[in-house]
Amino acid sequence: MASAKQDAPPQLAPPPPKPETQPQQVAAAAAASSSASAAGPPELEFDGTSFESANLASAKLVSLQPCEYDLQIRPDTLNSRHRVWFYFSVKGARAGQKVVFNILGYSKTKSLFRDGMAPVVCTSARPYWERMPPQSVFYYRSPRHNKDYVLSFPFCFERADETYYFAYCFPYTYSYLQRFLLALEHKALPCLHRELLCRSIQERRLDLLTISSPANLALDAAIRAGHAVGSPPAPEGAPPGTGPVAPRRVVLVSARVHPGESPASFMMHGLILFLTSEHARARELREHVILKVVPMLNPDGVFLGNYRCNSCGLDLNRLWHASMPGMAPTIHAVRELARQYTAHAAHAAARGGTPAAALEMILDMHAHSTCMNGFIFANLPEDLREMDSVTAFPRCLANQAKDFSSAGCKFDRDESKAGTGRRALSEMLPGVHCYTLEVSMFCAAQGNVRGEAYQPASYTQMGHAIGLALHECYCTAKGVVLGAPALGGHAAAQHDASSAAIAATATTALSGAATTAPAEAAATTAAPTVHGTAATSAFAASAFAASASTTASAGVGSAGVGSATRAAYFPARAARPMAGGTHSAPMVRGGSAWVGAGRVGGTGSAYSSVRCASRLSNA
Ligand SMILES: [Zn+2]
Protein backbone atom coordinates (compact mmCIF):
# COMPACT_ATOMS: atom_id res chain seq x y z
CA MET A 1 0.00 0.00 0.00
CA ALA A 2 1.19 3.46 -0.77
CA SER A 3 0.92 5.33 2.43
CA ALA A 4 2.60 8.14 4.18
CA LYS A 5 4.58 7.07 7.12
CA GLN A 6 3.16 9.83 9.23
CA ASP A 7 0.03 11.90 9.42
CA ALA A 8 -3.37 10.86 8.21
CA PRO A 9 -4.50 12.22 4.86
CA PRO A 10 -6.72 15.27 5.01
CA GLN A 11 -9.44 13.32 3.26
CA LEU A 12 -9.71 9.74 2.25
CA ALA A 13 -10.10 8.56 -1.27
CA PRO A 14 -13.32 9.08 -3.15
CA PRO A 15 -15.15 6.19 -4.71
CA PRO A 16 -14.14 5.43 -8.23
CA PRO A 17 -16.44 7.21 -10.64
CA LYS A 18 -19.54 5.49 -11.81
CA PRO A 19 -19.56 4.74 -15.48
CA GLU A 20 -21.24 7.57 -17.24
CA THR A 21 -22.88 8.10 -20.55
CA GLN A 22 -20.99 9.61 -23.42
CA PRO A 23 -23.76 11.58 -25.14
CA GLN A 24 -21.86 12.26 -28.32
CA GLN A 25 -21.48 8.61 -28.97
CA VAL A 26 -24.81 7.24 -27.88
CA ALA A 27 -26.22 7.36 -31.36
CA ALA A 28 -23.27 5.49 -32.70
CA ALA A 29 -23.19 3.02 -29.89
CA ALA A 30 -24.12 -0.46 -30.69
CA ALA A 31 -23.84 -3.64 -28.82
CA ALA A 32 -20.72 -5.28 -30.07
CA SER A 33 -21.32 -7.84 -32.70
CA SER A 34 -21.81 -11.44 -31.81
CA SER A 35 -22.59 -14.58 -33.62
CA ALA A 36 -25.92 -15.86 -32.47
CA SER A 37 -26.73 -19.39 -31.68
CA ALA A 38 -30.17 -20.86 -31.48
CA ALA A 39 -29.34 -23.08 -28.54
CA GLY A 40 -28.35 -22.18 -25.01
CA PRO A 41 -28.94 -19.07 -22.97
CA PRO A 42 -29.58 -15.70 -24.63
CA GLU A 43 -26.44 -13.95 -25.70
CA LEU A 44 -24.92 -11.30 -23.52
CA GLU A 45 -25.18 -7.68 -24.54
CA PHE A 46 -21.84 -5.90 -24.62
CA ASP A 47 -21.20 -2.17 -24.76
CA GLY A 48 -17.72 -0.81 -25.32
CA THR A 49 -18.52 2.55 -26.86
CA SER A 50 -21.43 4.44 -25.33
CA PHE A 51 -19.94 5.61 -22.05
CA GLU A 52 -16.91 7.62 -21.14
CA SER A 53 -13.48 5.95 -21.37
CA ALA A 54 -15.10 2.78 -22.74
CA ASN A 55 -13.06 0.54 -24.98
CA LEU A 56 -14.17 -2.65 -26.66
CA ALA A 57 -14.15 -3.26 -30.40
CA SER A 58 -16.14 -6.45 -30.65
CA ALA A 59 -17.48 -9.48 -28.81
CA LYS A 60 -17.93 -12.92 -30.31
CA LEU A 61 -19.53 -15.96 -28.77
CA VAL A 62 -17.13 -18.83 -29.44
CA SER A 63 -18.45 -21.60 -27.23
CA LEU A 64 -21.66 -22.50 -25.44
CA GLN A 65 -20.34 -25.20 -23.11
CA PRO A 66 -18.69 -23.54 -21.35
CA CYS A 67 -20.07 -20.19 -22.43
CA GLU A 68 -17.08 -18.31 -23.77
CA TYR A 69 -16.60 -14.96 -25.53
CA ASP A 70 -13.67 -13.52 -27.45
CA LEU A 71 -13.48 -9.78 -26.80
CA GLN A 72 -11.31 -7.53 -28.94
CA ILE A 73 -9.64 -4.40 -27.57
CA ARG A 74 -10.14 -1.35 -29.78
CA PRO A 75 -6.85 0.30 -30.79
CA ASP A 76 -6.17 3.90 -29.83
CA THR A 77 -7.83 6.49 -32.03
CA LEU A 78 -5.94 6.70 -35.34
CA ASN A 79 -3.11 4.60 -33.98
CA SER A 80 -3.37 0.84 -34.15
CA ARG A 81 -0.07 0.28 -32.32
CA HIS A 82 -1.51 0.79 -28.85
CA ARG A 83 -4.01 -1.73 -27.50
CA VAL A 84 -4.00 -2.27 -23.74
CA TRP A 85 -6.83 -0.39 -22.01
CA PHE A 86 -10.28 -2.02 -22.02
CA TYR A 87 -13.50 -0.99 -20.32
CA PHE A 88 -16.89 -2.41 -21.22
CA SER A 89 -20.27 -3.35 -19.83
CA VAL A 90 -22.24 -6.57 -20.01
CA LYS A 91 -25.91 -7.14 -19.39
CA GLY A 92 -28.51 -9.72 -20.23
CA ALA A 93 -26.99 -12.56 -18.24
CA ARG A 94 -29.07 -15.03 -16.30
CA ALA A 95 -28.61 -15.19 -12.54
CA GLY A 96 -25.89 -17.73 -11.92
CA GLN A 97 -24.68 -17.76 -15.53
CA LYS A 98 -21.00 -18.63 -15.85
CA VAL A 99 -18.96 -17.17 -18.68
CA VAL A 100 -15.32 -17.19 -19.73
CA PHE A 101 -14.04 -13.94 -21.25
CA ASN A 102 -10.96 -13.93 -23.49
CA ILE A 103 -9.60 -10.43 -24.05
CA LEU A 104 -7.63 -10.24 -27.28
CA GLY A 105 -5.44 -7.83 -29.13
CA TYR A 106 -2.87 -6.69 -26.58
CA SER A 107 -0.07 -4.73 -28.12
CA LYS A 108 2.24 -5.61 -25.22
CA THR A 109 3.55 -9.01 -24.35
CA LYS A 110 4.77 -8.22 -20.87
CA SER A 111 2.02 -7.56 -18.39
CA LEU A 112 1.48 -7.55 -14.66
CA PHE A 113 -1.39 -9.95 -15.37
CA ARG A 114 1.36 -12.57 -15.45
CA ASP A 115 2.37 -11.57 -11.94
CA GLY A 116 -1.05 -11.76 -10.35
CA MET A 117 -2.72 -8.53 -11.39
CA ALA A 118 -6.42 -8.86 -12.11
CA PRO A 119 -8.97 -6.74 -13.97
CA VAL A 120 -11.47 -4.67 -12.00
CA VAL A 121 -15.23 -5.07 -11.89
CA CYS A 122 -18.28 -3.25 -10.60
CA THR A 123 -22.01 -3.37 -11.22
CA SER A 124 -24.78 -0.86 -11.67
CA ALA A 125 -26.10 -1.73 -8.21
CA ARG A 126 -22.67 -1.79 -6.58
CA PRO A 127 -20.66 0.90 -8.34
CA TYR A 128 -17.49 0.31 -6.33
CA TRP A 129 -14.63 -1.05 -8.34
CA GLU A 130 -12.92 -4.14 -7.06
CA ARG A 131 -10.11 -6.25 -8.39
CA MET A 132 -11.10 -9.76 -9.34
CA PRO A 133 -9.39 -12.61 -7.51
CA PRO A 134 -6.09 -13.27 -9.25
CA GLN A 135 -6.36 -17.03 -8.92
CA SER A 136 -8.76 -17.16 -11.84
CA VAL A 137 -7.01 -14.70 -14.14
CA PHE A 138 -4.73 -16.06 -16.88
CA TYR A 139 -2.45 -14.20 -19.29
CA TYR A 140 -0.83 -16.51 -21.81
CA ARG A 141 0.03 -17.20 -25.43
CA SER A 142 -3.09 -18.79 -26.84
CA PRO A 143 -2.69 -21.48 -29.50
CA ARG A 144 -6.22 -20.77 -30.65
CA HIS A 145 -5.35 -17.10 -31.30
CA ASN A 146 -2.16 -17.39 -33.36
CA LYS A 147 -0.17 -17.64 -30.13
CA ASP A 148 -1.03 -14.04 -29.36
CA TYR A 149 -1.26 -13.00 -25.74
CA VAL A 150 -4.75 -13.38 -24.32
CA LEU A 151 -6.22 -12.46 -20.96
CA SER A 152 -8.80 -15.03 -19.83
CA PHE A 153 -10.96 -14.97 -16.76
CA PRO A 154 -14.21 -16.63 -15.72
CA PHE A 155 -17.12 -14.80 -14.26
CA CYS A 156 -20.37 -15.78 -12.62
CA PHE A 157 -23.20 -13.27 -12.95
CA GLU A 158 -25.08 -13.20 -9.70
CA ARG A 159 -28.07 -11.16 -10.77
CA ALA A 160 -29.98 -10.83 -14.02
CA ASP A 161 -31.11 -7.24 -13.57
CA GLU A 162 -27.70 -5.59 -13.21
CA THR A 163 -25.23 -4.21 -15.70
CA TYR A 164 -21.70 -5.36 -15.02
CA TYR A 165 -18.61 -3.29 -15.86
CA PHE A 166 -15.11 -4.65 -16.45
CA ALA A 167 -11.93 -2.62 -16.89
CA TYR A 168 -8.18 -2.95 -17.19
CA CYS A 169 -7.72 -0.77 -14.10
CA PHE A 170 -9.85 1.59 -11.98
CA PRO A 171 -11.34 4.16 -14.37
CA TYR A 172 -10.92 7.85 -13.61
CA THR A 173 -12.81 9.80 -16.24
CA TYR A 174 -12.64 13.34 -17.56
CA SER A 175 -16.13 14.10 -16.22
CA TYR A 176 -15.21 12.80 -12.80
CA LEU A 177 -12.24 15.17 -12.72
CA GLN A 178 -14.47 18.05 -13.80
CA ARG A 179 -16.90 17.35 -10.97
CA PHE A 180 -14.06 17.13 -8.48
CA LEU A 181 -12.55 20.43 -9.63
CA LEU A 182 -15.94 22.14 -9.65
CA ALA A 183 -16.57 21.02 -6.08
CA LEU A 184 -13.15 22.37 -5.09
CA GLU A 185 -13.85 25.64 -6.84
CA HIS A 186 -17.15 26.04 -4.99
CA LYS A 187 -15.26 25.97 -1.72
CA ALA A 188 -13.69 29.31 -2.70
CA LEU A 189 -10.42 28.36 -1.04
CA PRO A 190 -8.03 31.31 -0.73
CA CYS A 191 -5.13 29.03 -1.63
CA LEU A 192 -6.57 27.85 -4.96
CA HIS A 193 -6.97 29.40 -8.36
CA ARG A 194 -8.47 27.37 -11.21
CA GLU A 195 -8.18 28.47 -14.80
CA LEU A 196 -8.68 27.16 -18.30
CA LEU A 197 -5.20 26.83 -19.76
CA CYS A 198 -6.47 25.82 -23.20
CA ARG A 199 -8.96 23.59 -24.98
CA SER A 200 -8.07 20.21 -26.40
CA ILE A 201 -8.65 19.33 -30.04
CA GLN A 202 -12.11 18.08 -29.15
CA GLU A 203 -12.75 21.20 -27.05
CA ARG A 204 -12.30 19.68 -23.62
CA ARG A 205 -10.79 21.69 -20.80
CA LEU A 206 -7.11 21.63 -19.97
CA ASP A 207 -7.34 22.76 -16.37
CA LEU A 208 -4.56 24.52 -14.54
CA LEU A 209 -4.70 24.84 -10.76
CA THR A 210 -2.40 27.22 -8.94
CA ILE A 211 -2.11 26.37 -5.26
CA SER A 212 -0.18 28.58 -2.86
CA SER A 213 -0.64 31.25 -0.22
CA PRO A 214 -2.82 34.22 -1.22
CA ALA A 215 0.27 36.47 -1.41
CA ASN A 216 2.03 33.97 -3.66
CA LEU A 217 -1.03 33.63 -5.88
CA ALA A 218 -0.98 37.38 -6.44
CA LEU A 219 2.75 37.29 -7.12
CA ASP A 220 2.33 34.47 -9.58
CA ALA A 221 -0.48 36.24 -11.42
CA ALA A 222 1.67 39.35 -11.80
CA ILE A 223 4.60 37.33 -13.12
CA ARG A 224 2.46 35.54 -15.69
CA ALA A 225 0.92 38.82 -16.75
CA GLY A 226 4.43 40.01 -17.56
CA HIS A 227 4.54 42.68 -14.88
CA ALA A 228 7.86 43.64 -13.37
CA VAL A 229 7.89 42.01 -9.97
CA GLY A 230 10.49 42.54 -7.29
CA SER A 231 11.54 40.23 -4.48
CA PRO A 232 8.72 38.26 -2.91
CA PRO A 233 7.61 39.06 0.61
CA ALA A 234 9.03 36.96 3.42
CA PRO A 235 6.89 33.88 4.01
CA GLU A 236 4.50 33.95 6.94
CA GLY A 237 6.31 32.72 10.02
CA ALA A 238 9.79 33.48 8.75
CA PRO A 239 12.08 34.61 11.55
CA PRO A 240 13.07 38.25 11.38
CA GLY A 241 16.43 39.10 9.91
CA THR A 242 16.71 36.04 7.72
CA GLY A 243 18.31 38.05 5.00
CA PRO A 244 17.16 38.61 1.45
CA VAL A 245 14.19 36.52 0.46
CA ALA A 246 14.94 34.02 -2.27
CA PRO A 247 12.68 33.55 -5.28
CA ARG A 248 9.55 31.60 -4.64
CA ARG A 249 9.93 28.06 -5.86
CA VAL A 250 7.56 26.96 -8.58
CA VAL A 251 6.74 23.27 -8.93
CA LEU A 252 4.75 22.03 -11.92
CA VAL A 253 2.91 18.73 -11.50
CA SER A 254 1.00 17.00 -14.28
CA ALA A 255 -0.72 13.69 -14.90
CA ARG A 256 -2.54 11.58 -17.41
CA VAL A 257 -0.64 12.39 -20.57
CA HIS A 258 -1.21 8.66 -21.11
CA PRO A 259 -4.93 8.13 -20.80
CA GLY A 260 -4.82 4.42 -19.95
CA GLU A 261 -2.75 5.11 -16.84
CA SER A 262 -5.65 5.93 -14.55
CA PRO A 263 -3.76 5.38 -11.26
CA ALA A 264 -1.91 8.62 -12.05
CA SER A 265 -5.22 10.46 -11.70
CA PHE A 266 -5.91 8.92 -8.31
CA MET A 267 -2.43 10.01 -7.20
CA MET A 268 -3.13 13.49 -8.53
CA HIS A 269 -6.46 13.48 -6.72
CA GLY A 270 -4.75 12.70 -3.42
CA LEU A 271 -2.07 15.32 -4.02
CA ILE A 272 -4.63 18.05 -4.76
CA LEU A 273 -6.60 17.14 -1.63
CA PHE A 274 -3.41 17.41 0.42
CA LEU A 275 -2.19 20.65 -1.14
CA THR A 276 -5.52 22.41 -0.62
CA SER A 277 -6.02 21.07 2.91
CA GLU A 278 -5.43 22.70 6.27
CA HIS A 279 -2.77 20.13 7.09
CA ALA A 280 0.02 22.07 8.82
CA ARG A 281 2.61 20.92 6.30
CA ALA A 282 0.39 21.80 3.39
CA ARG A 283 0.00 25.32 4.78
CA GLU A 284 3.73 25.66 5.27
CA LEU A 285 4.42 24.31 1.79
CA ARG A 286 2.06 26.89 0.28
CA GLU A 287 4.03 29.65 1.99
CA HIS A 288 7.22 28.62 0.23
CA VAL A 289 6.16 27.08 -3.04
CA ILE A 290 3.82 27.97 -5.90
CA LEU A 291 2.32 24.73 -7.18
CA LYS A 292 1.10 24.64 -10.76
CA VAL A 293 -1.05 21.56 -11.24
CA VAL A 294 -2.28 20.18 -14.58
CA PRO A 295 -4.42 17.19 -13.58
CA MET A 296 -5.21 15.79 -17.02
CA LEU A 297 -2.87 16.50 -19.94
CA ASN A 298 -4.78 14.37 -22.42
CA PRO A 299 -8.50 14.86 -21.75
CA ASP A 300 -9.53 13.66 -25.22
CA GLY A 301 -7.58 10.42 -24.91
CA VAL A 302 -9.10 9.75 -21.49
CA PHE A 303 -12.60 10.42 -22.79
CA LEU A 304 -12.10 8.23 -25.85
CA GLY A 305 -10.81 5.25 -23.88
CA ASN A 306 -7.34 5.32 -25.44
CA TYR A 307 -4.26 3.84 -23.84
CA ARG A 308 -1.50 6.26 -24.91
CA CYS A 309 -2.69 8.64 -27.62
CA ASN A 310 -4.78 11.74 -28.12
CA SER A 311 -7.58 12.10 -30.67
CA CYS A 312 -5.02 12.45 -33.49
CA GLY A 313 -3.30 9.18 -32.67
CA LEU A 314 -0.28 10.94 -31.18
CA ASP A 315 1.58 9.85 -28.07
CA LEU A 316 1.81 13.25 -26.43
CA ASN A 317 4.67 12.13 -24.23
CA ARG A 318 6.91 11.98 -27.29
CA LEU A 319 6.08 15.50 -28.46
CA TRP A 320 7.39 17.76 -25.72
CA HIS A 321 10.39 18.79 -27.81
CA ALA A 322 8.19 20.20 -30.58
CA SER A 323 5.69 23.01 -30.48
CA MET A 324 2.54 21.68 -32.16
CA PRO A 325 -0.36 23.90 -31.13
CA GLY A 326 -2.63 22.29 -33.73
CA MET A 327 -2.00 18.61 -33.12
CA ALA A 328 -0.97 18.77 -29.46
CA PRO A 329 -2.46 21.96 -28.01
CA THR A 330 -2.30 20.83 -24.39
CA ILE A 331 1.42 20.09 -24.57
CA HIS A 332 2.03 23.40 -26.34
CA ALA A 333 0.10 25.25 -23.61
CA VAL A 334 2.12 23.70 -20.78
CA ARG A 335 5.39 24.45 -22.60
CA GLU A 336 4.29 28.07 -22.92
CA LEU A 337 3.37 28.13 -19.24
CA ALA A 338 6.89 27.01 -18.33
CA ARG A 339 8.35 29.61 -20.65
CA GLN A 340 6.62 32.39 -18.73
CA TYR A 341 8.89 31.67 -15.77
CA THR A 342 12.05 31.53 -17.86
CA ALA A 343 11.05 34.81 -19.48
CA HIS A 344 10.52 36.31 -16.04
CA ALA A 345 13.95 35.08 -14.92
CA ALA A 346 15.60 36.48 -18.06
CA HIS A 347 13.88 39.81 -17.55
CA ALA A 348 15.03 39.99 -13.94
CA ALA A 349 18.58 39.09 -14.94
CA ALA A 350 18.59 41.80 -17.60
CA ARG A 351 17.74 44.29 -14.89
CA GLY A 352 20.51 42.92 -12.71
CA GLY A 353 18.07 41.52 -10.16
CA THR A 354 16.79 38.15 -9.10
CA PRO A 355 13.45 36.72 -10.17
CA ALA A 356 10.52 36.78 -7.79
CA ALA A 357 9.75 33.15 -8.60
CA ALA A 358 11.67 30.39 -10.30
CA LEU A 359 10.52 27.12 -11.81
CA GLU A 360 12.51 24.41 -10.06
CA MET A 361 10.77 21.08 -10.53
CA ILE A 362 8.48 19.37 -13.02
CA LEU A 363 6.84 16.12 -11.97
CA ASP A 364 4.81 14.15 -14.51
CA MET A 365 2.74 11.28 -13.09
CA HIS A 366 2.30 7.96 -14.88
CA ALA A 367 1.34 4.38 -14.08
CA HIS A 368 3.45 1.40 -15.10
CA SER A 369 2.02 -1.75 -16.66
CA THR A 370 4.97 -4.06 -16.04
CA CYS A 371 6.73 -2.88 -12.85
CA MET A 372 5.88 -2.99 -9.18
CA ASN A 373 6.04 -0.15 -6.64
CA GLY A 374 6.31 3.56 -7.10
CA PHE A 375 9.54 4.84 -8.63
CA ILE A 376 11.03 7.74 -10.56
CA PHE A 377 12.75 8.23 -13.89
CA ALA A 378 15.17 11.16 -13.63
CA ASN A 379 17.79 12.72 -15.87
CA LEU A 380 21.40 11.95 -15.20
CA PRO A 381 23.09 15.36 -14.94
CA GLU A 382 26.17 16.22 -16.96
CA ASP A 383 27.83 17.43 -13.78
CA LEU A 384 27.69 14.67 -11.22
CA ARG A 385 27.95 17.19 -8.42
CA GLU A 386 24.33 17.95 -9.22
CA MET A 387 23.27 14.46 -8.20
CA ASP A 388 22.72 15.70 -4.69
CA SER A 389 19.89 17.94 -5.76
CA VAL A 390 18.61 15.59 -8.48
CA THR A 391 18.11 12.83 -5.94
CA ALA A 392 16.65 15.12 -3.27
CA PHE A 393 13.01 14.72 -4.18
CA PRO A 394 13.17 10.94 -4.75
CA ARG A 395 14.82 10.54 -1.38
CA CYS A 396 12.17 12.65 0.32
CA LEU A 397 9.45 10.60 -1.37
CA ALA A 398 11.14 7.40 -0.23
CA ASN A 399 10.94 8.79 3.31
CA GLN A 400 7.23 9.48 3.00
CA ALA A 401 5.84 6.58 0.95
CA LYS A 402 6.78 3.16 2.24
CA ASP A 403 6.28 1.46 -1.12
CA PHE A 404 8.19 4.01 -3.13
CA SER A 405 11.15 1.99 -4.33
CA SER A 406 14.55 3.61 -4.31
CA ALA A 407 15.79 0.50 -6.06
CA GLY A 408 13.34 1.05 -8.87
CA CYS A 409 14.46 4.60 -9.64
CA LYS A 410 16.30 5.09 -12.91
CA PHE A 411 18.68 7.90 -13.77
CA ASP A 412 19.54 8.05 -17.45
CA ARG A 413 20.19 10.06 -20.59
CA ASP A 414 18.36 7.58 -22.77
CA GLU A 415 18.01 8.88 -26.33
CA SER A 416 14.94 6.74 -26.87
CA LYS A 417 13.12 8.89 -24.36
CA ALA A 418 13.69 12.11 -26.28
CA GLY A 419 10.38 13.86 -26.57
CA THR A 420 9.19 12.84 -23.13
CA GLY A 421 8.37 15.65 -20.77
CA ARG A 422 11.27 14.64 -18.57
CA ARG A 423 13.89 14.77 -21.31
CA ALA A 424 12.60 17.59 -23.51
CA LEU A 425 11.67 20.01 -20.75
CA SER A 426 15.00 19.55 -18.98
CA GLU A 427 16.74 20.57 -22.21
CA MET A 428 14.37 23.49 -22.74
CA LEU A 429 14.62 24.59 -19.11
CA PRO A 430 18.22 24.20 -17.89
CA GLY A 431 18.45 23.85 -14.15
CA VAL A 432 14.90 22.59 -13.72
CA HIS A 433 14.65 19.08 -12.27
CA CYS A 434 12.27 17.04 -14.42
CA TYR A 435 10.93 13.70 -13.21
CA THR A 436 8.61 11.01 -14.42
CA LEU A 437 6.86 9.48 -11.43
CA GLU A 438 5.54 5.97 -11.99
CA VAL A 439 3.29 3.86 -9.83
CA SER A 440 2.51 0.24 -10.50
CA MET A 441 -0.85 -0.71 -11.96
CA PHE A 442 -0.71 -3.63 -9.54
CA CYS A 443 1.08 -3.47 -6.21
CA ALA A 444 4.24 -2.91 -4.26
CA ALA A 445 6.77 -5.67 -3.74
CA GLN A 446 10.00 -6.13 -1.88
CA GLY A 447 11.88 -9.16 -3.08
CA ASN A 448 9.40 -11.98 -3.29
CA VAL A 449 7.06 -10.39 -0.80
CA ARG A 450 4.18 -8.55 -2.40
CA GLY A 451 1.90 -6.09 -0.74
CA GLU A 452 -1.80 -6.09 -1.32
CA ALA A 453 -2.99 -5.04 -4.73
CA TYR A 454 -3.39 -1.29 -4.99
CA GLN A 455 -6.83 0.19 -4.63
CA PRO A 456 -7.87 3.73 -5.53
CA ALA A 457 -7.27 4.72 -1.91
CA SER A 458 -3.70 3.39 -2.16
CA TYR A 459 -3.04 5.71 -5.07
CA THR A 460 -4.56 8.74 -3.37
CA GLN A 461 -2.43 7.94 -0.33
CA MET A 462 0.60 8.04 -2.60
CA GLY A 463 -0.55 11.49 -3.73
CA HIS A 464 -0.70 12.55 -0.11
CA ALA A 465 2.83 11.22 0.38
CA ILE A 466 4.00 13.23 -2.63
CA GLY A 467 2.70 16.35 -0.90
CA LEU A 468 4.58 15.45 2.26
CA ALA A 469 7.72 14.80 0.22
CA LEU A 470 7.45 18.23 -1.39
CA HIS A 471 7.17 19.70 2.09
CA GLU A 472 10.21 17.77 3.26
CA CYS A 473 12.11 18.85 0.19
CA TYR A 474 11.32 22.54 0.37
CA CYS A 475 10.50 23.29 3.98
CA THR A 476 12.81 21.18 6.14
CA ALA A 477 16.48 20.67 6.65
CA LYS A 478 16.09 17.09 5.40
CA GLY A 479 15.50 18.34 1.91
CA VAL A 480 18.79 18.72 0.13
CA VAL A 481 19.60 22.13 -1.25
CA LEU A 482 17.42 22.84 -4.24
CA GLY A 483 18.51 26.08 -5.81
CA ALA A 484 18.50 28.97 -3.37
CA PRO A 485 17.36 28.31 0.17
CA ALA A 486 13.87 29.43 1.03
CA LEU A 487 14.63 31.42 4.13
CA GLY A 488 17.89 33.10 3.45
CA GLY A 489 19.99 30.05 3.86
CA HIS A 490 19.68 28.81 7.39
CA ALA A 491 17.65 25.71 6.64
CA ALA A 492 19.31 24.32 3.61
CA ALA A 493 22.75 23.84 5.03
CA GLN A 494 21.71 21.14 7.43
CA HIS A 495 21.50 17.77 5.76
CA ASP A 496 20.85 15.00 8.14
CA ALA A 497 23.36 12.18 8.30
CA SER A 498 21.34 9.70 6.28
CA SER A 499 20.72 12.09 3.42
CA ALA A 500 24.37 12.98 3.24
CA ALA A 501 25.33 9.31 3.24
CA ILE A 502 22.96 8.48 0.41
CA ALA A 503 24.15 11.43 -1.61
CA ALA A 504 27.79 10.45 -1.10
CA THR A 505 27.12 6.88 -2.19
CA ALA A 506 25.25 8.04 -5.23
CA THR A 507 28.03 10.34 -6.30
CA THR A 508 30.66 7.65 -5.85
CA ALA A 509 28.77 5.15 -7.94
CA LEU A 510 28.01 7.64 -10.64
CA SER A 511 31.63 8.70 -10.85
CA GLY A 512 32.52 5.10 -11.62
CA ALA A 513 29.74 4.71 -14.13
CA ALA A 514 30.60 7.91 -15.91
CA THR A 515 34.16 6.78 -16.57
CA THR A 516 32.92 3.65 -18.29
CA ALA A 517 32.00 3.67 -21.95
CA PRO A 518 28.25 3.44 -22.46
CA ALA A 519 28.38 -0.04 -23.97
CA GLU A 520 30.63 -1.28 -21.18
CA ALA A 521 28.44 0.28 -18.59
CA ALA A 522 25.47 -1.59 -19.94
CA ALA A 523 27.40 -4.82 -20.11
CA THR A 524 29.10 -4.68 -16.75
CA THR A 525 26.16 -3.51 -14.73
CA ALA A 526 23.77 -6.34 -14.31
CA ALA A 527 21.20 -4.36 -12.47
CA PRO A 528 17.80 -4.20 -14.09
CA THR A 529 17.63 -0.50 -13.39
CA VAL A 530 20.36 0.37 -15.90
CA HIS A 531 19.02 1.47 -19.26
CA GLY A 532 20.97 2.20 -22.40
CA THR A 533 23.70 4.69 -21.72
CA ALA A 534 22.40 5.21 -18.27
CA ALA A 535 24.16 4.82 -15.05
CA THR A 536 22.12 3.96 -12.05
CA SER A 537 22.54 5.80 -8.85
CA ALA A 538 23.76 3.91 -5.87
CA PHE A 539 20.68 5.47 -4.40
CA ALA A 540 19.25 2.24 -5.75
CA ALA A 541 22.23 -0.04 -5.80
CA SER A 542 21.70 -1.89 -2.58
CA ALA A 543 18.44 -3.38 -3.71
CA PHE A 544 19.34 -4.71 -7.15
CA ALA A 545 18.99 -8.28 -6.02
CA ALA A 546 15.56 -7.68 -4.59
CA SER A 547 14.47 -5.97 -7.76
CA ALA A 548 15.67 -8.83 -9.90
CA SER A 549 13.93 -11.42 -7.81
CA THR A 550 10.73 -9.43 -8.05
CA THR A 551 10.72 -9.43 -11.79
CA ALA A 552 11.54 -13.10 -11.86
CA SER A 553 8.78 -14.17 -9.56
CA ALA A 554 6.33 -16.62 -10.99
CA GLY A 555 3.15 -15.31 -12.42
CA VAL A 556 -0.28 -16.58 -11.65
CA GLY A 557 -1.74 -18.81 -14.25
CA SER A 558 1.05 -18.27 -16.72
CA ALA A 559 0.58 -21.75 -18.05
CA GLY A 560 -2.48 -20.69 -19.93
CA VAL A 561 -5.97 -22.01 -20.25
CA GLY A 562 -6.58 -25.46 -21.55
CA SER A 563 -9.71 -27.54 -21.46
CA ALA A 564 -8.52 -29.33 -18.34
CA THR A 565 -7.91 -26.18 -16.38
CA ARG A 566 -11.09 -24.66 -17.67
CA ALA A 567 -13.03 -27.17 -15.61
CA ALA A 568 -11.39 -25.68 -12.57
CA TYR A 569 -12.88 -22.31 -13.32
CA PHE A 570 -16.11 -23.15 -11.62
CA PRO A 571 -15.30 -24.77 -8.33
CA ALA A 572 -17.85 -25.35 -5.64
CA ARG A 573 -18.90 -22.21 -3.89
CA ALA A 574 -16.81 -22.82 -0.82
CA ALA A 575 -13.76 -24.09 -2.65
CA ARG A 576 -12.20 -20.72 -3.42
CA PRO A 577 -12.33 -18.64 -0.28
CA MET A 578 -11.09 -15.11 -0.30
CA ALA A 579 -7.56 -15.62 0.80
CA GLY A 580 -5.01 -13.03 1.70
CA GLY A 581 -2.26 -12.34 -0.78
CA THR A 582 -2.92 -9.84 -3.44
CA HIS A 583 -6.61 -9.20 -2.99
CA SER A 584 -7.33 -6.37 -0.67
CA ALA A 585 -10.22 -5.19 1.37
CA PRO A 586 -13.46 -4.05 -0.19
CA MET A 587 -14.54 -0.46 -0.14
CA VAL A 588 -17.57 0.35 1.93
CA ARG A 589 -19.29 3.59 2.63
CA GLY A 590 -18.45 5.04 6.00
CA GLY A 591 -20.08 8.38 6.65
CA SER A 592 -19.06 10.81 3.97
CA ALA A 593 -15.70 9.19 3.40
CA TRP A 594 -14.76 5.99 1.67
CA VAL A 595 -12.74 3.59 3.65
CA GLY A 596 -11.22 0.20 3.16
CA ALA A 597 -13.05 -2.26 5.35
CA GLY A 598 -11.80 -5.46 6.78
CA ARG A 599 -12.62 -8.58 4.88
CA VAL A 600 -16.10 -9.03 6.26
CA GLY A 601 -18.67 -11.71 5.82
CA GLY A 602 -22.02 -10.08 5.46
CA THR A 603 -24.88 -11.43 3.49
CA GLY A 604 -24.27 -10.06 0.04
CA SER A 605 -21.82 -11.99 -2.02
CA ALA A 606 -21.27 -9.65 -4.91
CA TYR A 607 -20.12 -12.06 -7.58
CA SER A 608 -20.89 -15.41 -6.23
CA SER A 609 -19.84 -18.87 -7.05
CA VAL A 610 -16.37 -18.30 -8.43
CA ARG A 611 -15.97 -15.54 -5.90
CA CYS A 612 -15.16 -13.09 -8.62
CA ALA A 613 -15.15 -10.33 -6.10
CA SER A 614 -14.90 -10.00 -2.42
CA ARG A 615 -17.85 -9.73 -0.16
CA LEU A 616 -19.20 -6.36 0.74
CA SER A 617 -20.36 -5.42 4.14
CA ASN A 618 -23.88 -4.29 4.82
CA ALA A 619 -22.67 -0.88 5.89
ZN1 LIG B 1 2.94 6.72 -19.14
Image (cartoon, grey):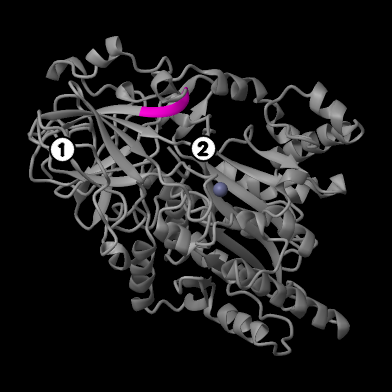
Asked if disc 1 is less than 8 Å from ligand 1, the answer is: no
* Residue 476 visible somewhere in the drawing: no
Residue 148: x and y in percent read 47, 27
546 vs 272, left or right, is right
Q: Nearer the viewer, residue 170 or 453?
A: 170
Question: Is 404 within the magenta?
Answer: no
Where, quadrant-wise, is the N terminus in this rendering? top left
Note whether 106 is above or below 565 in the view shown.
Answer: below
What kind of residue is marked 2? Ser
Q: Which residue is mark 1?
A: 43
591 vs 188, left or right, is left
348 vs 569, left or right, is right
Query: Where is residue 169, by image quadrant?
Result: top left
Quick one: SS at disc 1? Answer: loop
What kind of residue is marked 1? Glu
Residue 128: x and y in percent read 24, 47
Q: Which residues are magenta?
A: 147-151
* Residue 268 visible somewhere in the drawing: yes
Residue 203: x and y in percent read 46, 74
Residue at 28% across / 44% down in the picture?
Answer: 129
Q: Depth-wise, is mark 1 or mark 2 nearer the camera? A: 1
Q: Which residue is mark 2?
A: 107
Question: Is 148 within the magenta?
Answer: yes
